[in-house]
């Protein structure tokens, strides 16, 4: 009389074979990835920030994995006394690419944002730290997004309540 093999007796060789394939696959060399070359490229576009007063015209320039971004903003809004207030802003960020793929770059950065309000209160300085990504749809057009933390000084106090911040943008690269 012939007996059926036990199911658990057949599982062990199959699991060992699967483990061997996974190990061999992990040891095999990975194909070379082509990273998006951003070296010596200037990007012109727009930046949108969680505090919309920080949004404006943006310039990015990359030197290999290190980049710089400047943001210029101008706002006109009704003041508390009925006159128009003018908000002029300037931001400067340093960026570093942590990882680059064929179409997407992951970066960290930090910077300062300065605002001057003419005819009203609200001058402030903001320091920020961020983590973001930039995705290239073509060699010349990219969108980006980031999350970060901000704190700063206003006319009257240190503003820690701003806390988490987000932003995004688009750039045309030349």
Image (cartoon, helix red, strand yellow):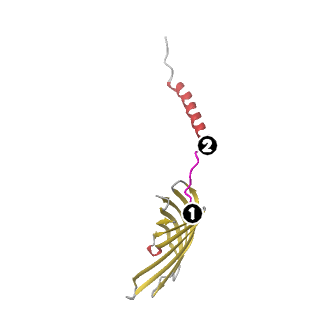
In this picture, residue 21 sits left or right of residue 49: right
Question: Which residue is painted at 58% across and 60% down in the image?
Answer: 97
Q: Nearer the viewer, residue 171 or 97?
A: 171
What percent of the width, then of the height, locates residue 124?
51, 80
What percent of the width, then of the height, locates residue 134?
50, 61
Density class for disc 2 (Cα within 10 Å; few <14, some 14-19, many ≥20) is: few
User: Magenta stretch: residue 35 in it?
Assistant: yes
Whether residue 133 is visible here, answered yes or no, is: yes
Whether residue 153 is visible here, answered yes or no, is: no
**Image: 40 above or below 10:** below
Density class for disc 1 (Cα within 10 Å; few <14, some 14-19, many ≥20) is: some
The residue beneath circle 2 is 29
Which mark is on residue 152? none
Q: Nearer the viewer, residue 142 or 139?
A: 139
Question: Which residue is painted at 47% across and 82% down in the image?
Answer: 122
The residue beneath circle 1 is 108
Find the magenta span and give its range: 27-40
């Amino acid at each position: 009389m012939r007996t059926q093999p036990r199911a658990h007796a057949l599982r062990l060789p199959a699991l060992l074979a699967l483990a061997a394939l996974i190990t061999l696959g992990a040891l095999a060399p990975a194909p070379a990835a082509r990273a998006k070359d951003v070296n010596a490229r200037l990007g012109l576009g727009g930046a949108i920030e969680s505090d919309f007063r920080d949004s404006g015209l943006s310039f990015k320039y990359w030197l290999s994995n290190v980049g710089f971004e400047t943001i210029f903003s101008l706002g006109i809004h009704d003041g508390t006394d009925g006159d128009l207030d003018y908000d002029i802003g300037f931001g400067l960020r340093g960026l570093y690419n942590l990882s680059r793929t064929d179409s997407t770059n992951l970066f960290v950065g930090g910077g300062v944002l300065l605002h001057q309000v003419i005819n009203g209160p609200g001058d402030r300085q903001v320091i920020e730290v961020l983590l973001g990504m930039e995705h290239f749809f073509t060699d010349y057009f990219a969108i980006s997004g980031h999350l970060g933390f901000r704190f700063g000084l206003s006319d009257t106090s240190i503003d820690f309540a701003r806390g988490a911040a987000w932003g995004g943008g688009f750039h045309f690269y030349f």
